[in-house]
Image: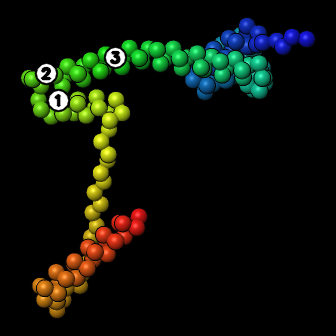
């Protein structure tokens, strides 16, 4: 016996379910023509049906492919705008730099992020001479440097 695919009504349910962003399965069932009284149980059954789940996955992949195709042309337009800003001598330097960074980032040439860590250290300086205080600060800096090397 041949394996049967989803019915037209089941396909319609999947399409409605996707239109509703997979959030309102009962409403998707109603929109697909199932009885409002049985829509909740029908939708639950549909979402466990292997044929329906297979079709749902297929439709999601199709939608993703279509969306990528649409964004491909938007990305080309965005690249052109950024390139125009970089090459426009009348653009502000800051705008040109930001556009250049954005272009490089999108091309995979993002600079390494550097994070600065600030910390407060309480040093009891009572009774220390300036030289002793400077020595204590240098000692703390060496300790911090050693712990940075370990991390």
Q: Is residue 16 visible?
A: no
Judge the density around disc 1: few (<14), some (14-19), many (≥20) Cα neighbours within 10 Å: many
Residue 14 percent coordinates (x, y): 67, 17
Query: Does label 3 or label 2 sit earlier along the sequence?
Result: 3
Spatial CA span between label 1 and label 2: 8 Å
Q: Residue at x 30, y 42 (%)?
A: 111
Callout 1: SS: helix
Left or right of residue 68: residue 116: left
> Compared to 31, does 142 lie above or below?
below
Query: Does label 1 or label 3 sit earlier along the sequence?
Result: 3
Query: Does label 1 or label 2 sit earlier along the sequence?
Result: 2
Contact flag, marks 1 and 3 (Cβ < 8 Å): no
Q: Which residue is mark 3?
A: 76
Q: Which residue is mark 2?
A: 88
Q: Which residue is mark 1?
A: 96
The front one of 73 and 143 is 143
Callout 3: SS: helix
Spatial CA span between label 3 and label 2: 18 Å
Left or right of residue 98: residue 59: right
Q: Residue at x 32, y 35 (%)?
A: 109
Contact flag, marks 1 and 2 (Cβ < 8 Å): yes
């Amino acid at each position: 016996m041949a394996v049967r695919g989803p019915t037209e009504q089941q396909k319609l349910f999947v399409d409605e379910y996707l239109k509703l962003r997979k959030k309102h399965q009962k409403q998707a069932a109603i929109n697909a023509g199932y009885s409002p009284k049985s829509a909740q149980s029908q939708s639950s059954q549909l979402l466990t049906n292997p044929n329906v789940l297979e079709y749902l996955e297929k439709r999601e992949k199709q939608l993703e492919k279509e969306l990528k195709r649409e964004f491909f042309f938007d990305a080309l337009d965005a690249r052109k705008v950024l390139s125009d800003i970089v090459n426009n001598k009348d653009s502000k330097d800051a705008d040109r730099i930001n556009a250049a960074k954005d272009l490089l980032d999108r091309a995979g040439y993002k600079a390494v992020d550097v994070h600065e860590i600030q910390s407060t250290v309480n040093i009891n300086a009572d009774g220390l001479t300036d030289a002793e205080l400077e020595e204590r600060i240098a000692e703390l800096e060496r300790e911090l440097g050693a712990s940075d090397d370990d991390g």
